[in-house]
Each structure stands twice: as C-alpha cells, then as structure tokens.
Image: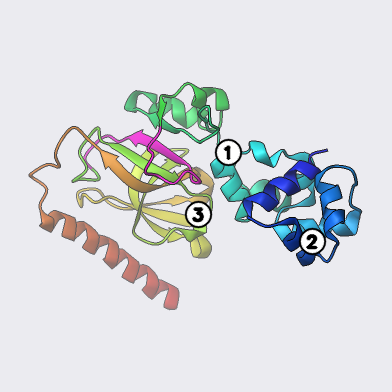
Amino acid sequence: MLFASNIKFLRKRKNRTQDEVAEALGMKRPTLSGYENDVAMPGIPALIQFSNYFGISVDTLLKIDISRLTGHQLYMLEHGEDIYLKGGKIRVLATTVDRNNVDNIELVPEKAKAGYTRGFFDPEYISELPRYQLPFLPSDRKFRTFQISGDSMLPLPDGAWVTGEFVQDWLSLPDGEACIILTLDEGIVFKMVVNRISEEGRLQLVSLNPDYQPYWVNVPEVREIWRFVNYTSSELPSGNVSQEMIGRALNTIQADLREIRKKVLE
C-alpha cells in the first residue's frame, strides 16, 4: 500500500512534524504514526481528511508513488493539477529525466520539428531528442528548447534557440506574452499571443515583424504552449532591425487589443 509512504513523504515535504499534522487532522500522534508506518489503515473519513489536508485526491494517495514523481509533476500535483481530481483536463506531457529524477530540457532542432508535430505526446520519441540542463532555471518547472526559423520574430535571428516553460493553464496567459505554440496546421510557431480563450475560445498570434499579419487559431487546434524564457544564438540581432520596426509591431498589438476591447464592450 502506497498510502503510508505517501503521507510520510508529503508531511516531510511540508516540513511538518507528526504532532503538527495530527493536531491539524484532529487525531492523536500515535494514530498518525501507525498510518505512516503501515501498521494501521485509516477509514474513509480519515482518508478524506488526509485528502483535504494535502489537497490531493484519495486515489492518488492510494495508487501513485508520489516520491517517484519528477519535480515538475510534483509541483503540478501540489498546485491542484491532480488527474484524479480534474480527470482528462490535465495536460499530460511526455518528458525525460536525468539520473537524479530531475526534468531534462529537450532540444527540438529545425530538422526535428516535423517529427515533433506528430510525436510530441510519444515518450519514446521525446526520449530520442537531445537533452541538457540549465542549473539557473527552476527545477520545479518544465522547459523545452526549440529552434526557430524565418524572420517573423525579428530581432531574434533565423536559427535561434528559444527556451520555453510549459504552460498548463492556458487561461492564465496574459496578452502580449511571447510563446512557442504547437498547432495542428502550423506546427511549431513562435509568436506573441492575444488571449481570447475565455471569451471566444481562440488565440491571436502576432509577429514582431510587422510584415507578417496577425492571425487567429482556435483552441482545439492547439496542442502545446510554452512561455518564452530566453534564447541563444551564434548571431547578433540583425542591424537592419530598428527600434522603429519593433515599436510598430508593438503598436499593432496594442491597436488590435483596443479594437477587441471595443467590440467586447459594444
């Protein structure tokens, strides 16, 4: 039974003593000790108490070895993304970990982008991607690096490597956020987003280069969203990109936002 090891693991992760947890649950410390040492099994009312205290479903406490979850998975679990509580709404992500069970950062080079569109959900495909670690990034979040192509997001040059943080809650994306987005039709694109999921069930994707027109994608077409964190490139940003160009692109986004707000208020 995994319940005993799970509640002990979660208690220690919260830096709580047995006395503190027992008091919070309204039980005696020896009773809690018996549960943690697997010499006694709580009844249904006590199971519900533990579930409410840790914010984790009874099914997870009984069936999942929580100590073996990756840092990202554990973070998501502790922040309300429990598949047994939310069912299919949780976005399952194929990932890889190092020997210390820490999430790797997988690289998706230009030549692998077509394959990624078909295999992004396949653990075997993801395990074949190059991977590395960036120690200055938080270990409790999931990151992936994609190679971009073209000039739609100048001043980032063609061939730059863009690292993004996996976005679980798409509704939380603020307008103007730069994101790597995987869609059914377009594949992997790097754009600024205008978030209208709540109101209209879609996102507007905007390029920094004003030569490219914004366009809309419906949520069912979207498969993954990664929030921009940083980029690396062997080239300096193009000297042909002026502050005026960047300003025009940002003005376009702001004008679109004003127009959308106007329509919403009408």
| Left or right of 240 in this view: 131 | right
| Left or right of 232 in this view: 92 | right
Q: Which residue is mark 2?
A: 22
Select label 1 or label 3 by which is in front.
Answer: 1
Nearer-the-camera pick, 110 or 233: 233
Q: Which residue is mark 1?
A: 70
Going from the N terminus, do you reach mark 1 or mark 2 first?
A: 2
Residue extent of the magenta highlight: 133-151
Which residue lies at the image location 44% right of the left edge and 58% below the top edge? 173
Residue 136 in the magenta stretch? The answer is yes
How far is disc 1 from disc 3 in space, using C-alphas?
22 Å
Q: Is residue 197 visible?
A: yes
Nearer-the-camera pick, 213 or 183: 183
Going from the N terminus, do you reach mark 1 or mark 3 first?
A: 1
| Left or right of 241 in this view: 252 | right
Number of labels in the image equals: 3
Residue 158, how many percent across, how many down? Answer: 22, 35
Residue 240, how many percent across, how many down? Answer: 8, 45
Name which quarter of the figure residue 64 lies in: top right
Q: Is residue 82 visible?
A: no
